[in-house]
Image (tube, helix red, strand yellow):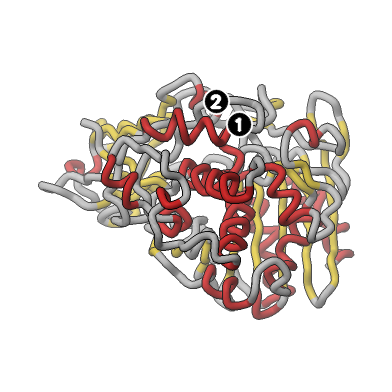
Amino acid sequence: MQTWLDENLARLIGKYDVPAASIAVLADGEVSAAAAGVLNLNTGVEATTDAIFQVGSITKLWTTTLIMQLVAEGKVDLDRPVRDYLPELKLADEEVAAAVTPRHLLVHTGGFSGDAFTPTSRGDDGVELYVRDVAPGLAQEVPLGAGFSYNNAGFVILGRIAEVLRGKPYHELLREHIAVPLELEHVATIPDEALLYRTALGHVSPTPGAPLRAAPQWSLVHAMGPAGALLSMSARDLIGFGRAYLDATLLDRAAIDSLWEPQVDVPAIGGFADRWGLGWMIFTVDGGPLYGHDGGTIGQSAYFRLVPGKGVAVALLTNGGDSPALYDELVGHVLRETAGVELPKRPVPPTEPAAISPDLVTGRYDGVLTSVAVTVEDGEVWALEAAVSEEAKAVLPEPRRKRFVGLDESRLIAAEPERGVHEVLAFRDPVGGRAAYLFHGGRLTPRGD
């Protein structure tokens, strides 16, 4: 595998306009690693295998690990109310605040607004202040436990549980309870630590099809650390974390197996998990099962996969470009060769688009970060997504308008790909022939009109 990676990585990142990538593979007990490209187009610093990239929401698996260590010590019960550990917890819906459990948060069924990327503090009190000052304004968008809706804020609350029960800030817990025991060498839990390493910067296109440029900022808000705003590492060290799950180093085998037990189904939008365990994505693939998580920050995308039955782990870290297409070809080859796993093909527009009711789909769907307006114009379906706040513009700098066609009776698919992917919109729970929710980017977004 090492020879194949060395011979093909540079070619593939060029093919998919990815400035830099780092990949590490654990197979047959050995780790192969390769890196290629430029970490920062402004400086020209080249990628090496010890360079660190942001891993984004893969951090949620580290937060899950901290919580499960507390469960093993008898300090947390996943089915007790969060208020048993955070009596001060407030949400916009008082009944939900009193009833929500760590399990709800781990499987993304809390139902409250999860994408309030609201700055609080750049210090050790950032998570605490988020729970105190931001959480009370998180509106209930979906009934508690009613369905999967990806929730970053829920993992900030989980991080705060760990802080309170351990008496230390979240970033120190990552190092003390995970990075140090695993002897990981290239890990940054806060931006100050990232300065110690060769560090990747994300790259973005201001509008679809525009050339990549260096992102205007390195990280998302500090308060979102437990959800994936800050943690960075080398691909090799991410594999070190994966090995701990294959070898049951940080948690016992029974606890790990419980994390990989499906808890909730996820609407099919392609390239996303179809089920969710406790913190973990679960993918249905030929030759699986396949577990892992993806991560995305400002211009950086990360992919982490485990095939426990074959002892295989793969970590791919990137800093812009058509990273999903790179993942499909690069990780797809690695999993096929090392584990006999075949990744599913991403959905593409059908030759004959399916008929879908305009009444079902048209309308405005309002989230915390963005609003999506679906319209029908001259028989064509269009969706306009726009940021709803200045904070949201860090994720979506300019509005994006796309044409969609019917994928089936309840899903639309983008007619043209963006960064190698045809986006899928799923419409859920119709009332009077009109969808109550749009499942978009992993979130159930309620109709706002």
| Label pair 2/1, CB-CB below 8 angstroms | yes
Residue 117 in the image, given as x and y percentages of width and height: 50, 31
Observer-side mark, 2 or 1, equals 1
Which quarter of the picture shows residue 69? Answer: bottom right
Tell me, for residue 120, which label it has, or none: 2
**Dot 1: what SS?**
loop
How far apart are labels 2 and 1 at the CA level?
A: 8 Å
Residue 436 in the image, given as x and y percentages of width and height: 22, 45
User: Which amino acid type corresponds to the residue marked 1 in the rendered image?
Assistant: Asp
- Direction from residue 418 to residue 219 in the image, left or right: right
- Nearest the viewer among 181 and 146 is 181
Q: Looking at the picture, does residue 384 appear above or below residue 441?
A: above
Disc 1 target residue? 125
Q: Can residue 406 be seen in this view?
A: no
**Dot 2: what SS?**
loop
First in sequence: mark 2 or mark 1?
Answer: 2
- Nearest the viewer among 342 and 298 is 298
- Direction from residue 316 to residue 430 in the image, left or right: left
Q: Looking at the picture, does residue 353 appear above or below residue 281?
A: above
- Nearest the viewer among 212 and 102 is 102
Count numbered badges in the picture.
2
Residue 114 in the image, given as x and y percentages of width and height: 43, 40
Residue 151 in the image, given as x and y percentages of width and height: 45, 46
